[in-house]
Structures are given as C-alpha cells and as structure tokens.
Amino acid sequence: MPYPKGHKTKVRNKIVESAARAFRTKGIQDVSVPFIMKGAGLTHGGFYAHFDNKEQLVAEACRYAITDTIALLQKAADQEQRTPKINTVIDYYLSPHHRDKTDMGCIIPALSAEISRSSEEVRQVFTHEVERMIAFISNLAEIELSKGRALFSTLVGSLVLARTVSDPDLSNNLLSAGKQAAKELVKTSSA
C-alpha cells in the first residue's frame, strides 16, 4: 500500500526539525545521523532516502531554524504595543529564557564557530541566513543595514558570552549589558 500524498515531505520535515533541535543544543560534530533520526521517531536507515549527506541536512536545518526564529521574533513584535518594536525583540533575544532554551533558540550563536570549519556549501547557506536575519532586524528597527549588522552582532555576541560563562550573575549581567547596548544603538541610529 503506497504512502499518502505528502508523506515523504512530512517525514523530511520531521528530520529537519529534529536536526535543528539537536544542532542548536549539541552542535554539528557531536550529533550523529542516528541521533537525529531517533529524535524524529525514525530509524537511521531511512536517512539517505531524504538527504545525500549530513552536510545537506545541516544546510536545511539552518534554513529551517532561522525561519523559525524570525517567525518567533516577528510574533513577539506583533503582539507588543510599545514602540519601537525592536525593543521587544532585543528583550526576548537577550532573555534568560532564550539563553537557557537552546533547543528552540537562534541557531546562529549555537553554530557560528563550527560553521566556520564547515564546507563551502554549508557556509554559503549559513551566510545567506545570517544576512536574512540581519535584514529582518534592520527592517524591524527601521535602521540602515550597516547599523543592523552592528545590532545583530551585539545580540549574538552577548548571547554567546552569557551562555558560555559558568557564573549565573555574570551571565545575567552580560544579557543586561547587551540589552542596554543594543537599545542604545537603535536609539542613536533612529535619532
């Protein structure tokens, strides 16, 4: 009996979602194909019916994760009454919740160091996704792209450091300092 229409796409999407969760939490190198497939509720034997290799999956997981993050941030901004709406995004991005929920957080700070050592194909996809995130941030903040790059760099750098340190007070202070710097950058760019 054949599978229903769209079955292969649904299975592929489950694999990409599982990979995005795993890569966000454990990185690329420490995640195996069997681990990803298990997270999708599948056996690892079916992987190659959907992907040529793990690199292809990494690229698709990055696309998926950035789309997911942009949608989440846009939803938060749309629900907020105060202006500028970018402040809501800054507050969420540099929140303890986002810092601690790595499995659902932005994939850019989670994978940046590893991506620099990945294939050119993966690096190109990741570069495009970083550019897409910067464009989203810039548009929401109503600032020029160069300022958006600085703003996003502030957000990512602050989050990476806050996730890295072992001292909870220092981690929280890094998030607060990042928020303050990011909001100041927006304020001076809009003036």
Image (cartoon, helix red, strand yellow):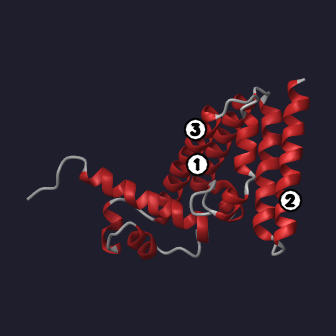
Residue 174 numbered tag: 2
Q: CA distance from mark 3 to mark 1?
A: 24 Å
Could you tell me the amino acid type at mark 3?
Lys
Residue neighbourhood size for the residue with mark 3, other residues' Cα within 10 Å, grouped as few (<14), some (14–19), many (≥20): few
Q: Secondary structure at mark 2?
A: helix
Residue 161 numbered tag: none
- 64 lies left or right of 83: left
**What residue lies at 70% left-to-right and 58% top-to-bottom?**
109
Q: Secondary structure at mark 3?
A: helix
Q: Closer to the N terminus: mark 2 or mark 1?
A: 1
Q: Secondary structure at mark 1?
A: helix
Q: CA distance from mark 2 to mark 1?
A: 29 Å
When asked about the image quadrant of residue 132, the answer is: top right
Residue 25, x across and y down, in percent: 60, 68
**What residue lies at 79% left-to-right and 40% top-to-bottom?**
149
Between circles 2 and 1, the one closer to the viewer is 2
Q: Which residue, given by chain and number where applicable, does mark 3 sit on?
A: 75
Q: Closer to the N terminus: mark 3 or mark 1?
A: 3
Could you tell me the amino acid type at mark 1?
Val
Residue 164, x across and y down, in percent: 78, 69
When asked about the image quadrant of residue 157, the answer is: bottom right
- 45 lies left or right of 2: right
- Residue 37 vs residue 73, the one in the foreground: 73
When asked about the image quadrant of residue 104, the answer is: bottom right
Q: Which residue, given by chain and number where applicable, does mark 1 sit on?
A: 125
Could you tell me the amino acid type at mark 2?
Leu
